[in-house]
Image (cartoon, rainbow, N blue to C red):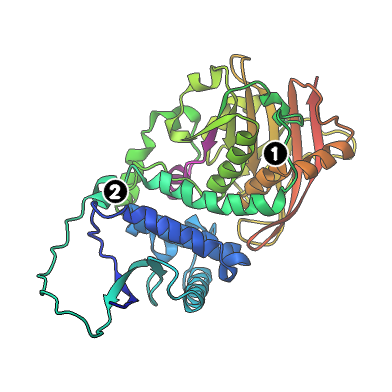
Amino acid sequence: MAQKATPDPVPSSASSNAASPDAEVLFELRQVLESSEFAGSERGRTLLVYLVENALSGGLERLKERTIGIEIFGRDASYDTGQDAIVRVSANSVRKRLQAYYSRVPAASRVRIVLPAGTYVPEFQRVVEEPVDVPGPAEVPQGPTARPPNAFLSKMRLSFALVVLVLACAVLGYQNWKFRSAVAVSVRPDVLPWSGFAGRADAGIILTDANFTLHKSFSHREMTLAEYSSLDWLYELKAQAPAMLPLSGVPYTSVASAVTASRIAILLDRWGVTSFVRSARNMQVDDFKEDRPMILLGSAPSNPWVELIHDRLNFHVSVDVVRGMQLVLNRSPRQGEQASYVPTAQNQTAGVAYAVVALMPNLANKGPILLIAGTNANATQAAGEFLTDLPLLRSELAGRKILPGRKVQKMELLLRVDCMNSGASRSEVVAHRLTP
């Protein structure tokens, strides 16, 4: 009997007995992200990952225009959605790119990702085989098959949310890696700051906490590390945003943080260093006293554990409350340096941003801490790209007369990042500090 493929909507009550509905969708997401339709749109890929991830994890409360504008495009919590159409324009672009992709490969997928007009909630349409009537022996009619109840998504949506985000964003990181780093990596890390990881069996990568950032946008106040680690702010968040109640316990991170983590994990794996990823919310002070490297992503407002090394930093990302922005302060300016480095780029706007990369011993002087923090999400991601692009890293170090394999106790690099609306186009070291 001949067969033809037609899309069939995948209901929210997808069966747990089926072949992992979420895994099929993530596989399809990867195919879409790798397609020519999305290859030139970083903004489109970022938005699609966010929409799919939240749809899979049950985070429908986040799929609203204002929330997307805040979490993906860096808009202020009070921004005017009537005047600023970035979410609507970007969603329409994603919708058209998906339509173009499936018109080109109509029968290549078991599941299709569709973004209906007028909504930010994607649908996952399963491609089923329908019989085509051809002469043949009569068949005994079969009764309808009952659809199994929802088990998988309702059971796993909270605990699986962060994993889905990291896995989906790892696709973006891996694609960027393939294009940016085709040079073979040595058996052992031989370039700063990675040479500080030599001989280590594993390393931790600490993600930013997106819910904590959202809480501060509601509370309009800064919080100490002690307040953050007590987790009392989670109860405040539930009171401030009741819609967030089902998700407040989920350790969400930003796309930039997840992409950076995936790039670093790939690099460390080539050196035989196993990496594990944790949310900042799940860390304890004692974790920074162990004999293993810890990589902190983001500045203190999104990853409060940066406070542990704040006083030891010459270059540090600080919040300017008056101007409502992050900048880099230089504690001890040298000749030709500025006391402060003020960015002109804010999240998804073009201009100049800055990032700090710092390597230093941990609290017990047993293992290294590596900080990667930018004045905005694009700058943090650009710093991660800079550190994992080994030819560029070596070139920049050599340009400042820093021997790539030199042994140091402490190193700080201040990066200037040229930002475009959807990412960074260029990074360079403008200042540094070394402690032999």
Q: Which residue is mark 1?
A: 356
In the rendered structure, which segment of residues is drawn in magenta?
204-221
- Can residue 83 be seen by looking at this rendering? no
Front one among 138 and 11: 138
Q: Amino acid at mark 1?
A: Val
Residue 209 x, y percent position in the rendering: 47, 41
Side of 10 where 145 appears, left or right: left
Residue sitting at 70 percent across and 24 percent down? 196
Label 1 neighbour load within 10 Å: few <14, some 14-19, many 20+: many
Residue 274 x, y percent position in the rendering: 55, 30
Q: Is residue 94 magenta?
A: no
Front one among 290 and 320: 290
Residue 299 x, y percent position in the rendering: 59, 39
Name the quarter where the C terminus is drawn: top right
Q: Is residue 374 above or below residue 348?
A: above
Q: Which residue is mark 2?
A: 246
Q: Is residue 263 above or below residue 73?
A: above
Dividing the picture into quadrants, the one containing residue 230 is top left
- Can residue 430 be seen by looking at this rendering? yes
Residue sitting at 65 percent across and 31 percent down? 271
Dividing the picture into quadrants, the one containing residue 5 is bottom left
Indicate which disc, 1 or 2, sits on the residue closer to the N terminus.
2
Residue sitting at 48 percent across and 71 percent down? 91
Q: Is residue 143 above or below residue 411?
A: below
Side of 132 where 426 appears, left or right: right
Side of 59 where 154 appears, left or right: left
Q: Is residue 375 above or below residue 284?
A: below
